[in-house]
Protein backbone atom coordinates (compact mmCIF):
# COMPACT_ATOMS: atom_id res chain seq x y z
CA UNK A 1 0.00 0.00 0.00
CA UNK A 2 1.26 3.51 -0.89
CA UNK A 3 -0.85 5.24 1.75
CA UNK A 4 -3.12 6.82 -0.90
CA UNK A 5 -6.86 6.18 -0.77
CA UNK A 6 -8.33 6.61 -4.25
CA UNK A 7 -11.99 7.42 -4.90
CA UNK A 8 -13.58 7.42 -8.35
CA UNK A 9 -15.99 10.38 -8.21
CA UNK A 10 -17.74 9.65 -11.53
CA UNK A 11 -21.49 9.78 -11.02
CA UNK A 12 -21.24 10.55 -7.30
CA UNK A 13 -22.56 13.50 -5.33
CA UNK A 14 -20.39 15.31 -2.80
CA UNK A 15 -22.31 13.60 0.01
CA UNK A 16 -21.61 10.17 -1.50
CA UNK A 17 -17.91 10.98 -1.87
CA UNK A 18 -17.69 12.12 1.75
CA UNK A 19 -19.33 8.89 2.91
CA UNK A 20 -17.03 6.74 0.77
CA UNK A 21 -13.93 8.63 1.93
CA UNK A 22 -14.95 8.20 5.54
CA UNK A 23 -15.47 4.47 5.04
CA UNK A 24 -12.18 3.88 3.22
CA UNK A 25 -10.05 6.00 5.57
CA UNK A 26 -11.62 4.22 8.51
CA UNK A 27 -10.66 0.86 7.02
CA UNK A 28 -7.07 1.89 6.16
CA UNK A 29 -4.97 2.66 9.25
CA UNK A 30 -2.06 3.69 7.01
CA UNK A 31 -3.96 6.25 4.93
CA UNK A 32 -1.84 9.34 4.30
CA UNK A 33 -3.83 10.99 1.53
CA UNK A 34 -7.21 10.78 -0.19
CA UNK A 35 -7.06 11.23 -3.96
CA UNK A 36 -10.29 12.14 -5.76
CA UNK A 37 -10.24 10.86 -9.33
CA UNK A 38 -12.48 11.77 -12.28
CA UNK A 39 -13.85 14.78 -10.44
CA UNK A 40 -15.01 16.28 -13.74
CA UNK A 41 -17.50 13.42 -14.13
CA UNK A 42 -18.96 13.84 -10.63
CA UNK A 43 -22.70 14.19 -10.14
CA UNK A 44 -25.44 11.55 -10.37
CA UNK A 45 -27.48 13.46 -12.98
CA UNK A 46 -26.61 15.02 -16.32
CA UNK A 47 -27.59 18.43 -14.99
CA UNK A 48 -25.23 18.03 -11.99
CA UNK A 49 -22.65 20.28 -13.66
CA UNK A 50 -21.86 22.10 -10.40
CA UNK A 51 -20.79 18.96 -8.55
CA UNK A 52 -17.08 19.11 -9.54
CA UNK A 53 -16.82 22.62 -8.06
CA UNK A 54 -18.53 21.48 -4.87
CA UNK A 55 -16.06 18.60 -4.54
CA UNK A 56 -13.04 20.83 -5.06
CA UNK A 57 -14.34 23.37 -2.56
CA UNK A 58 -14.88 20.64 0.04
CA UNK A 59 -11.46 19.11 -0.62
CA UNK A 60 -9.75 22.48 -0.28
CA UNK A 61 -11.51 23.90 2.78
CA UNK A 62 -13.16 21.13 4.82
CA UNK A 63 -11.84 17.67 4.07
CA UNK A 64 -8.64 17.65 6.11
CA UNK A 65 -10.58 18.49 9.27
CA UNK A 66 -12.82 15.53 8.57
CA UNK A 67 -10.16 12.86 8.09
CA UNK A 68 -6.88 14.25 9.41
CA UNK A 69 -5.18 13.62 6.04
CA UNK A 70 -4.96 15.76 2.89
CA UNK A 71 -7.71 15.31 0.31
CA UNK A 72 -6.63 16.15 -3.24
CA UNK A 73 -8.86 16.63 -6.28
CA UNK A 74 -6.41 15.03 -8.65
CA UNK A 75 -8.27 15.10 -11.91
CA UNK A 76 -6.95 17.58 -14.46
CA UNK A 77 -8.91 16.62 -17.56
CA UNK A 78 -11.08 19.32 -19.10
CA UNK A 79 -14.63 19.33 -17.83
CA UNK A 80 -16.16 21.30 -20.68
CA UNK A 81 -17.93 19.09 -23.17
CA UNK A 82 -16.45 18.89 -26.67
CA UNK A 83 -18.54 18.95 -29.86
CA UNK A 84 -19.27 15.56 -31.38
CA UNK A 85 -20.24 14.55 -34.93
CA UNK A 86 -23.95 13.79 -35.01
CA UNK A 87 -25.64 11.86 -37.82
CA UNK A 88 -28.46 14.18 -38.97
CA UNK A 89 -30.77 11.31 -39.87
CA UNK A 90 -30.76 10.09 -36.27
CA UNK A 91 -30.95 13.45 -34.52
CA UNK A 92 -34.43 12.71 -33.14
CA UNK A 93 -33.42 9.52 -31.34
CA UNK A 94 -30.17 11.03 -30.10
CA UNK A 95 -32.00 14.13 -28.87
CA UNK A 96 -34.37 11.89 -26.92
CA UNK A 97 -31.43 10.01 -25.43
CA UNK A 98 -29.72 13.29 -24.52
CA UNK A 99 -32.90 14.42 -22.73
CA UNK A 100 -32.50 11.53 -20.30
CA UNK A 101 -31.32 12.88 -16.97
CA UNK A 102 -29.58 9.75 -15.65
CA UNK A 103 -26.49 8.34 -17.34
CA UNK A 104 -28.26 4.99 -17.78
CA UNK A 105 -32.02 4.76 -18.24
CA UNK A 106 -34.50 2.01 -19.13
CA UNK A 107 -35.23 1.71 -22.83
CA UNK A 108 -39.00 2.29 -22.24
CA UNK A 109 -38.17 5.75 -20.85
CA UNK A 110 -36.06 6.53 -23.92
CA UNK A 111 -38.89 5.30 -26.12
CA UNK A 112 -41.42 7.56 -24.37
CA UNK A 113 -39.10 10.56 -24.81
CA UNK A 114 -38.52 9.77 -28.50
CA UNK A 115 -42.23 9.64 -29.19
CA UNK A 116 -42.84 12.81 -27.17
CA UNK A 117 -40.25 14.63 -29.30
CA UNK A 118 -41.84 13.57 -32.58
CA UNK A 119 -39.63 10.65 -33.55
CA UNK A 120 -42.83 8.78 -34.40
CA UNK A 121 -44.07 5.45 -33.03
CA UNK A 122 -41.05 3.29 -32.37
CA UNK A 123 -40.61 -0.08 -30.74
CA UNK A 124 -38.22 -0.86 -27.91
CA UNK A 125 -36.59 -3.47 -30.14
CA UNK A 126 -35.88 -0.90 -32.85
CA UNK A 127 -34.29 1.45 -30.30
CA UNK A 128 -32.13 -1.34 -28.89
CA UNK A 129 -30.87 -2.22 -32.37
CA UNK A 130 -30.12 1.45 -33.01
CA UNK A 131 -28.21 1.76 -29.71
CA UNK A 132 -26.07 -1.26 -30.58
CA UNK A 133 -25.11 0.32 -33.93
CA UNK A 134 -24.65 3.92 -32.79
CA UNK A 135 -21.07 4.62 -31.66
CA UNK A 136 -22.16 7.30 -29.17
CA UNK A 137 -24.51 4.99 -27.28
CA UNK A 138 -24.09 2.05 -24.93
CA UNK A 139 -26.71 -0.57 -24.13
CA UNK A 140 -26.09 -2.78 -21.13
CA UNK A 141 -27.84 -4.24 -18.10
CA UNK A 142 -28.28 -0.73 -16.65
CA UNK A 143 -30.15 0.47 -19.73
CA UNK A 144 -29.23 2.87 -22.49
CA UNK A 145 -26.80 5.77 -22.19
CA UNK A 146 -23.97 7.60 -23.88
CA UNK A 147 -20.39 6.40 -23.84
CA UNK A 148 -19.57 8.96 -21.15
CA UNK A 149 -20.89 11.97 -19.26
CA UNK A 150 -18.94 14.32 -21.52
CA UNK A 151 -20.55 12.88 -24.65
CA UNK A 152 -24.00 13.00 -23.07
CA UNK A 153 -23.66 16.67 -22.17
CA UNK A 154 -22.13 17.52 -25.55
CA UNK A 155 -25.05 16.02 -27.47
CA UNK A 156 -27.51 17.80 -25.17
CA UNK A 157 -25.76 21.12 -25.89
CA UNK A 158 -25.80 20.51 -29.65
CA UNK A 159 -29.44 19.40 -29.69
CA UNK A 160 -31.09 21.72 -27.15
CA UNK A 161 -34.79 21.38 -26.43
CA UNK A 162 -37.26 24.24 -26.51
CA UNK A 163 -39.52 24.89 -23.54
CA UNK A 164 -42.36 23.29 -25.48
CA UNK A 165 -40.28 20.19 -26.05
CA UNK A 166 -39.32 20.08 -22.36
CA UNK A 167 -43.01 20.16 -21.51
CA UNK A 168 -43.62 17.28 -23.92
CA UNK A 169 -40.86 15.31 -22.19
CA UNK A 170 -42.41 16.08 -18.79
CA UNK A 171 -45.78 14.83 -20.03
CA UNK A 172 -44.00 11.64 -21.07
CA UNK A 173 -42.57 11.38 -17.56
CA UNK A 174 -46.07 11.72 -16.11
CA UNK A 175 -47.25 8.96 -18.41
CA UNK A 176 -44.59 6.62 -17.01
CA UNK A 177 -45.79 6.81 -13.39
CA UNK A 178 -47.60 3.49 -13.62
CA UNK A 179 -44.66 1.71 -15.30
CA UNK A 180 -42.68 -0.29 -12.72
CA UNK A 181 -39.59 -0.32 -14.95
CA UNK A 182 -39.51 3.50 -14.88
CA UNK A 183 -39.90 3.89 -11.11
CA UNK A 184 -36.19 4.30 -10.43
CA UNK A 185 -35.81 6.87 -13.18
CA UNK A 186 -38.73 8.97 -11.91
CA UNK A 187 -37.38 8.71 -8.37
CA UNK A 188 -34.13 10.32 -9.48
CA UNK A 189 -35.16 12.70 -12.25
CA UNK A 190 -38.83 13.72 -12.09
CA UNK A 191 -38.19 17.04 -10.25
CA UNK A 192 -35.56 18.07 -12.80
CA UNK A 193 -37.90 17.41 -15.73
CA UNK A 194 -40.68 19.35 -13.98
CA UNK A 195 -38.27 22.25 -13.48
CA UNK A 196 -37.03 22.27 -17.08
CA UNK A 197 -40.65 22.32 -18.24
CA UNK A 198 -41.36 25.31 -16.00
CA UNK A 199 -43.89 23.25 -14.03
CA UNK A 200 -42.14 22.45 -10.74
CA UNK A 201 -44.20 25.03 -8.87
CA UNK A 202 -47.38 23.19 -9.84
CA UNK A 203 -46.10 19.93 -8.35
CA UNK A 204 -44.00 20.94 -5.37
CA UNK A 205 -46.79 20.50 -2.81
CA UNK A 206 -48.31 17.41 -4.44
CA UNK A 207 -47.95 14.45 -2.04
CA UNK A 208 -47.48 11.90 -4.81
CA UNK A 209 -44.73 13.99 -6.38
CA UNK A 210 -42.95 14.47 -3.06
CA UNK A 211 -43.14 10.77 -2.19
CA UNK A 212 -41.66 9.79 -5.55
CA UNK A 213 -38.89 12.43 -5.59
CA UNK A 214 -35.45 11.66 -4.21
CA UNK A 215 -33.76 14.43 -2.19
CA UNK A 216 -30.91 15.12 -4.61
CA UNK A 217 -33.12 15.43 -7.67
CA UNK A 218 -35.52 17.66 -5.77
CA UNK A 219 -32.70 19.98 -4.72
CA UNK A 220 -31.37 20.10 -8.27
CA UNK A 221 -34.88 20.74 -9.57
CA UNK A 222 -35.30 23.69 -7.22
CA UNK A 223 -31.96 25.11 -8.34
CA UNK A 224 -32.96 24.72 -12.00
CA UNK A 225 -36.42 26.19 -11.53
CA UNK A 226 -35.21 29.19 -9.51
CA UNK A 227 -31.72 30.14 -10.72
CA UNK A 228 -31.95 33.54 -9.00
CA UNK A 229 -32.86 31.98 -5.64
CA UNK A 230 -35.69 29.80 -4.37
CA UNK A 231 -38.64 32.01 -3.29
CA UNK A 232 -39.28 32.07 0.44
CA UNK A 233 -42.55 31.75 2.30
CA UNK A 234 -43.84 28.53 0.75
CA UNK A 235 -43.16 24.81 0.70
CA UNK A 236 -40.48 25.22 -2.01
CA UNK A 237 -38.55 27.59 0.23
CA UNK A 238 -39.07 25.30 3.23
CA UNK A 239 -37.63 22.27 1.43
CA UNK A 240 -34.77 24.39 0.10
CA UNK A 241 -33.97 25.54 3.63
CA UNK A 242 -34.07 21.94 4.87
CA UNK A 243 -31.27 21.19 2.41
CA UNK A 244 -29.42 24.34 3.44
CA UNK A 245 -29.60 23.20 7.06
CA UNK A 246 -27.75 20.04 6.10
CA UNK A 247 -30.60 17.52 5.83
CA UNK A 248 -29.01 15.96 2.77
CA UNK A 249 -27.93 12.38 2.13
CA UNK A 250 -30.40 10.92 4.63
CA UNK A 251 -30.06 7.33 5.73
CA UNK A 252 -33.02 6.35 3.57
CA UNK A 253 -35.71 7.79 1.32
CA UNK A 254 -38.17 7.20 4.14
CA UNK A 255 -36.09 9.39 6.44
CA UNK A 256 -36.09 12.18 3.84
CA UNK A 257 -39.88 11.87 3.55
CA UNK A 258 -40.16 12.21 7.32
CA UNK A 259 -38.47 15.61 6.90
CA UNK A 260 -40.81 16.45 4.02
CA UNK A 261 -43.77 15.50 6.20
CA UNK A 262 -42.37 17.72 8.94
CA UNK A 263 -42.13 20.64 6.49
CA UNK A 264 -45.73 20.16 5.35
CA UNK A 265 -47.05 20.05 8.91
CA UNK A 266 -45.03 23.13 9.82
CA UNK A 267 -46.40 24.99 6.79
CA UNK A 268 -49.96 24.10 7.80
CA UNK A 269 -50.53 21.66 4.90
CA UNK A 270 -52.01 18.94 7.08
CA UNK A 271 -53.90 17.07 4.36
CA UNK A 272 -50.80 16.78 2.17
CA UNK A 273 -48.75 15.68 5.19
CA UNK A 274 -51.31 12.99 6.05
CA UNK A 275 -51.21 11.68 2.49
CA UNK A 276 -47.42 11.44 2.56
CA UNK A 277 -47.62 9.53 5.85
CA UNK A 278 -50.26 7.21 4.39
CA UNK A 279 -48.15 6.34 1.34
CA UNK A 280 -44.95 5.30 3.12
CA UNK A 281 -43.91 4.03 6.54
CA UNK A 282 -42.03 6.94 8.06
CA UNK A 283 -39.31 6.40 10.68
CA UNK A 284 -40.87 9.28 12.62
CA UNK A 285 -43.91 11.49 12.09
CA UNK A 286 -44.50 15.07 13.14
CA UNK A 287 -47.73 15.29 15.15
CA UNK A 288 -47.68 19.03 15.77
CA UNK A 289 -45.28 21.82 15.02
CA UNK A 290 -44.47 25.40 15.94
CA UNK A 291 -41.41 25.42 13.72
CA UNK A 292 -40.12 28.87 12.77
CA UNK A 293 -38.78 28.47 9.27
CA UNK A 294 -36.07 30.75 7.93
CA UNK A 295 -38.20 30.88 4.76
CA UNK A 296 -41.11 32.54 6.58
CA UNK A 297 -43.53 31.56 9.31
CA UNK A 298 -46.54 29.42 8.67
CA UNK A 299 -49.63 31.11 10.16
CA UNK A 300 -49.59 30.46 13.90
CA UNK A 301 -52.34 31.05 16.43
CA UNK A 302 -49.74 31.51 19.16
CA UNK A 303 -46.39 32.73 17.78
CA UNK A 304 -43.44 31.61 19.89
CA UNK A 305 -41.07 34.33 21.06
CA UNK A 306 -37.35 33.97 20.67
CA UNK A 307 -36.00 31.65 23.33
CA UNK A 308 -32.87 31.78 25.47
CA UNK A 309 -33.51 28.21 26.67
CA UNK A 310 -35.72 25.28 25.71
CA UNK A 311 -36.82 22.73 28.32
CA UNK A 312 -39.12 19.86 29.12
CA UNK A 313 -40.91 20.62 32.38
CA UNK A 314 -43.25 18.79 34.76
CA UNK A 315 -46.85 19.99 34.64
CA UNK A 316 -48.54 20.48 37.99
CA UNK A 317 -51.38 18.16 36.95
CA UNK A 318 -48.91 15.55 35.68
CA UNK A 319 -47.24 14.90 32.37
CA UNK A 320 -44.67 16.95 30.51
CA UNK A 321 -44.79 20.31 28.78
CA UNK A 322 -42.53 21.94 26.26
CA UNK A 323 -41.28 25.23 27.68
CA UNK A 324 -39.18 28.08 26.42
CA UNK A 325 -37.55 30.61 28.73
CA UNK A 326 -36.43 34.13 28.00
CA UNK A 327 -34.77 36.64 30.26
CA UNK A 328 -36.64 39.89 30.83
CA UNK A 329 -34.98 42.61 28.79
CA UNK A 330 -35.82 45.28 31.38
CA UNK A 331 -35.27 43.24 34.55
CA UNK A 332 -32.13 41.14 34.14
CA UNK A 333 -32.13 37.93 36.13
CA UNK A 334 -35.90 37.46 35.81
CA UNK A 335 -36.93 34.71 33.39
CA UNK A 336 -40.32 34.22 31.76
CA UNK A 337 -41.65 30.84 30.67
CA UNK A 338 -44.13 29.86 27.93
CA UNK A 339 -45.51 26.30 27.81
CA UNK A 340 -47.13 23.93 25.33
CA UNK A 341 -48.54 20.44 25.84
CA UNK A 342 -46.00 17.89 24.60
CA UNK A 343 -48.51 15.47 23.12
CA UNK A 344 -50.95 17.88 21.44
CA UNK A 345 -49.13 21.19 20.99
CA UNK A 346 -51.87 23.03 22.89
CA UNK A 347 -50.71 26.36 24.33
CA UNK A 348 -50.78 26.11 28.11
CA UNK A 349 -49.94 29.66 29.04
CA UNK A 350 -47.28 32.31 29.49
CA UNK A 351 -45.35 34.40 30.02
CA UNK A 352 -45.02 33.18 33.60
CA UNK A 353 -42.30 34.04 36.12
CA UNK A 354 -42.95 30.83 38.09
CA UNK A 355 -40.69 28.32 36.35
CA UNK A 356 -41.69 24.66 36.45
CA UNK A 357 -39.20 21.93 37.34
CA UNK A 358 -37.46 20.19 34.47
CA UNK A 359 -38.30 16.54 33.88
CA UNK A 360 -35.72 13.79 33.87
CA UNK A 361 -34.55 12.69 30.45
CA UNK A 362 -33.13 9.39 29.32
CA UNK A 363 -29.47 9.57 28.23
CA UNK A 364 -29.73 13.18 27.10
CA UNK A 365 -31.84 12.50 24.04
CA UNK A 366 -34.48 15.07 24.91
CA UNK A 367 -37.28 12.54 25.37
CA UNK A 368 -39.17 12.95 28.60
CA UNK A 369 -39.20 9.99 30.94
CA UNK A 370 -42.61 8.34 30.72
CA UNK A 371 -43.51 10.10 27.48
CA UNK A 372 -43.00 7.14 25.15
CA UNK A 373 -42.92 8.03 21.49
CA UNK A 374 -43.42 11.76 22.07
CA UNK A 375 -40.40 14.01 21.68
CA UNK A 376 -39.57 17.69 21.50
CA UNK A 377 -37.02 19.73 19.60
CA UNK A 378 -34.39 21.50 21.67
CA UNK A 379 -31.66 24.10 21.00
CA UNK A 380 -33.48 25.07 17.85
CA UNK A 381 -32.56 27.87 15.51
CA UNK A 382 -31.79 28.54 11.89
CA UNK A 383 -28.82 30.44 10.49
CA UNK A 384 -28.29 32.16 13.83
CA UNK A 385 -31.79 33.64 13.87
CA UNK A 386 -32.41 32.00 17.23
CA UNK A 387 -35.94 30.96 16.31
CA UNK A 388 -37.85 28.93 18.86
CA UNK A 389 -39.86 25.91 17.84
CA UNK A 390 -41.36 22.70 19.10
CA UNK A 391 -42.34 19.50 17.39
CA UNK A 392 -44.25 16.56 18.78
CA UNK A 393 -43.43 13.34 16.98
CA UNK A 394 -44.29 9.69 17.07
CA UNK A 395 -41.41 7.33 16.32
CA UNK A 396 -41.87 4.02 14.59
CA UNK A 397 -41.59 0.91 16.74
CA UNK A 398 -42.60 0.51 20.36
CA UNK A 399 -40.13 1.07 23.12
CA UNK A 400 -37.23 1.71 20.74
CA UNK A 401 -34.51 4.14 21.73
CA UNK A 402 -34.47 7.52 20.01
CA UNK A 403 -31.86 10.19 19.50
CA UNK A 404 -31.59 13.71 18.11
CA UNK A 405 -30.69 14.47 14.53
CA UNK A 406 -28.14 17.29 14.66
CA UNK A 407 -27.40 19.25 11.54
CA UNK A 408 -25.66 22.39 10.36
CA UNK A 409 -24.20 24.91 12.79
CA UNK A 410 -24.89 22.71 15.80
CA UNK A 411 -28.63 23.27 15.84
CA UNK A 412 -31.12 20.46 16.29
CA UNK A 413 -33.38 20.83 13.29
CA UNK A 414 -35.19 17.51 13.48
CA UNK A 415 -37.18 15.43 15.86
CA UNK A 416 -35.88 12.33 17.53
CA UNK A 417 -36.11 9.07 15.65
CA UNK A 418 -35.34 5.37 16.14
CA UNK A 419 -31.62 4.69 16.35
CA UNK A 420 -30.22 2.75 13.41
CA UNK A 421 -26.96 2.93 11.45
CA UNK A 422 -27.01 6.08 9.35
CA UNK A 423 -24.71 7.26 6.60
CA UNK A 424 -24.14 10.62 8.24
CA UNK A 425 -22.63 9.02 11.35
CA UNK A 426 -18.94 9.81 11.54
CA UNK A 427 -17.84 6.95 13.72
CA UNK A 428 -16.63 7.13 17.28
CA UNK A 429 -14.27 9.55 18.91
CA UNK A 430 -12.92 12.96 17.91
CA UNK A 431 -12.14 11.91 14.33
CA UNK A 432 -15.72 10.78 13.81
CA UNK A 433 -17.14 13.99 15.23
CA UNK A 434 -14.83 16.03 13.01
CA UNK A 435 -16.04 14.08 9.97
CA UNK A 436 -19.64 14.88 10.79
CA UNK A 437 -18.87 18.58 11.28
CA UNK A 438 -17.02 18.80 7.97
CA UNK A 439 -19.79 16.99 6.10
CA UNK A 440 -22.37 19.37 7.52
CA UNK A 441 -20.33 22.42 6.61
CA UNK A 442 -19.88 21.06 3.08
CA UNK A 443 -23.65 20.77 2.76
CA UNK A 444 -24.23 24.27 4.05
CA UNK A 445 -21.60 25.62 1.64
CA UNK A 446 -23.53 23.97 -1.17
CA UNK A 447 -26.62 26.15 -0.76
CA UNK A 448 -28.22 24.44 -3.68
CA UNK A 449 -26.74 21.84 -6.04
CA UNK A 450 -24.15 23.63 -8.09
CA UNK A 451 -24.21 26.80 -6.00
CA UNK A 452 -22.98 28.37 -2.79
CA UNK A 453 -25.16 29.10 0.21
CA UNK A 454 -26.04 32.67 1.05
CA UNK A 455 -24.55 33.89 4.35
CA UNK A 456 -26.81 33.78 7.42
CA UNK A 457 -27.53 37.51 7.33
CA UNK A 458 -29.30 37.15 3.99
CA UNK A 459 -31.83 34.78 5.50
CA UNK A 460 -32.30 36.95 8.56
CA UNK A 461 -33.22 39.84 6.28
CA UNK A 462 -35.74 37.65 4.51
CA UNK A 463 -33.94 37.64 1.18
CA UNK A 464 -33.93 34.65 -1.08
CA UNK A 465 -30.76 32.55 -0.98
CA UNK A 466 -28.79 33.40 -4.08
CA UNK A 467 -30.56 36.71 -4.77
CA UNK A 468 -28.65 39.89 -5.34
Image (cartoon, helix red, strand yellow):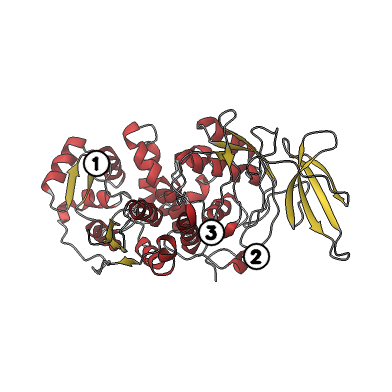
Foreground of the two, 335 or 258:
335
Of callouts 3 and 2, which one flags the residue occurring earlier in the amino acid sequence? Answer: 3
**Which residue sits furthest top?**
398
* Circle 1 residue: 142
Res. 307 in view: no
Q: Quadrant of the N terminus?
A: bottom left
Task: Assign a secondary structure to mark 2.
Answer: helix
Q: Determine the residue positioned at 17% across, 47% down.
A: 138
Judge left or right: residue 172 versus residue 359.
Answer: left
Is the Cβ of the residue at disc 3 closer than 8 Å to that at disc 2?
Answer: no
Q: Determine the residue positioned at 32% across, 58% down.
A: 42
Give residue 230's mark: 3
Q: How many marks?
A: 3
How many angstroms separate mark 3 from mark 1 (CA)? 34 Å
Residue 280 at what x, y percent from top left? 50, 32
**Which residue sits furthest left?**
133
Judge left or right: residue 313 versus residue 68.
Answer: right
Count neighbours of disc 2 (C-alpha within 10 A) and say few if under 14, some if 14 to 19, many if 20 or more: some
* Circle 2 residue: 460
Foreground of the two, 197 or 221:
221
Q: Determine the residue positioned at 53% across, 36% down.
A: 283
**In the image, is residue 290 above or below residue 254?**
below
Judge left or right: residue 142 versus residue 266.
Answer: left
Residue 220 at what x, y percent from top left? 43, 54
Looking at the image, is mark 3 or mark 2 nearer the viewer? 2
Amino acid sequence: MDGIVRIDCAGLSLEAVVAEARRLVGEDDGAEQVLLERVGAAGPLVRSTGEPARLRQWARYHAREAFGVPVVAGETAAEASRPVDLPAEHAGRLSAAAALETFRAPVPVWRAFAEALGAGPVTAEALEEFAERERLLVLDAGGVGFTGAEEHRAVREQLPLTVGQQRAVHRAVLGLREEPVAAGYLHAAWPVHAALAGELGEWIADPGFLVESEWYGLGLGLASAYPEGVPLGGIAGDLHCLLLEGVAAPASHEEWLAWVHHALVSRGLGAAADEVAARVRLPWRTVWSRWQWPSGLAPLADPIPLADEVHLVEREEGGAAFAIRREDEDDWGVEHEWRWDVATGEFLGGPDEDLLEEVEEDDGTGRAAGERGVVVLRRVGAYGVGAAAAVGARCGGRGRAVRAVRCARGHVVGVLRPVRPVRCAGGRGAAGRAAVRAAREARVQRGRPGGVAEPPAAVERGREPGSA
